């Protein structure tokens, strides 16, 4: 596994120690580092994290957390083409389709999410964070 794409919910697990998936997300990041994987996330995940996390952590703290994400994660280039292409992956949730389009743009080998739906049309293998720990 070389390119591992993280959905927003897994990034939130990583940042918030009170979330159920926090320990697994931390383990996943450590494993990815050890194995030389490129961790990726979408551009729009950052604004979602800012909005959701800002309410809990406050502006300055969430911005520090965002800085740590952009220093470690690669953000695939996306734009008009990818937004239009996302409709090919639409399976009930356009935001999930956008995640898939971003993962495709990043040539991801694996897409990691806690979401149970919305990823049925992904051309990239979609797994839970726990399952990803055994794959990378």
Image (spheres, rainbow, N blue to C red):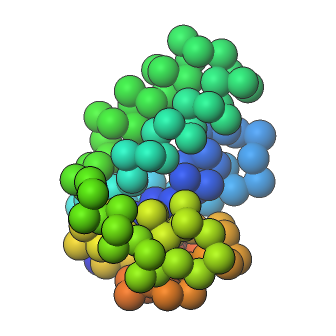
Q: Is residue 62 left or right of residue 53?
A: left
- Location of the N terminus (image quadrant): bottom left
> Who's the residue at 39% across and 53% down the image?
41
Circle count: 0
Residue 90: x and y, percent? 52, 78
Instruction: From this view, report whether residue 54 is shown above or below residue 91.
Output: above
Residue 111: x and y, percent? 44, 72
Residue 46 in sight in this render: yes
115 or 91, nearer to the observer: 91
Instruction: From this view, report whether residue 12 is shown above or below residue 100.
Output: above
Residue 80: x and y, percent? 27, 57
Q: Is residue 81 left or right of residue 130?
A: left
Corner quadrant of residue 76: bottom left
Residue 111 in sight in this render: no
> Who's the residue at 45% across and 30% down the image?
66
For the view shown, which residue lies furthest in the top direction? 60
> Who's the residue at 65% across and 16% down the image?
58
Q: Is residue 133 left or right of residue 80?
A: right
74 or 30, nearer to the observer: 74
Residue 71: x and y, percent? 29, 34
- Location of the C terminus (image quadrant): bottom left
Q: Is residue 87 left or right of residue 22?
A: left
90 or 47, nearer to the observer: 90
């Amino acid at each position: 596994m070389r390119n591992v794409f993280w959905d927003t919910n897994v990034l939130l697990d990583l940042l918030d120690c009170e979330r159920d998936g926090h320990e697994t997300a931390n383990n996943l990041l450590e494993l990815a580092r050890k194995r030389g994987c490129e961790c990726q996330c979408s551009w729009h995940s950052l604004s979602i994290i800012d909005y959701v996390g800002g309410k809990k952590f406050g502006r300055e703290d969430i911005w520090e957390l965002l800085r740590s994400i952009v220093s470690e994660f690669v953000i695939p280039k996306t734009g008009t083409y990818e937004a239009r292409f996302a409709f090919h992956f639409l399976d009930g949730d356009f935001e999930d389709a956008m995640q898939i389009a971003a993962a495709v743009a990043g040539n991801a080998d694996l897409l990691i999410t806690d979401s149970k739906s919305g990823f049925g049309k992904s051309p990239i293998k979609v797994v839970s964070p726990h399952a990803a720990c055994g794959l990378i």
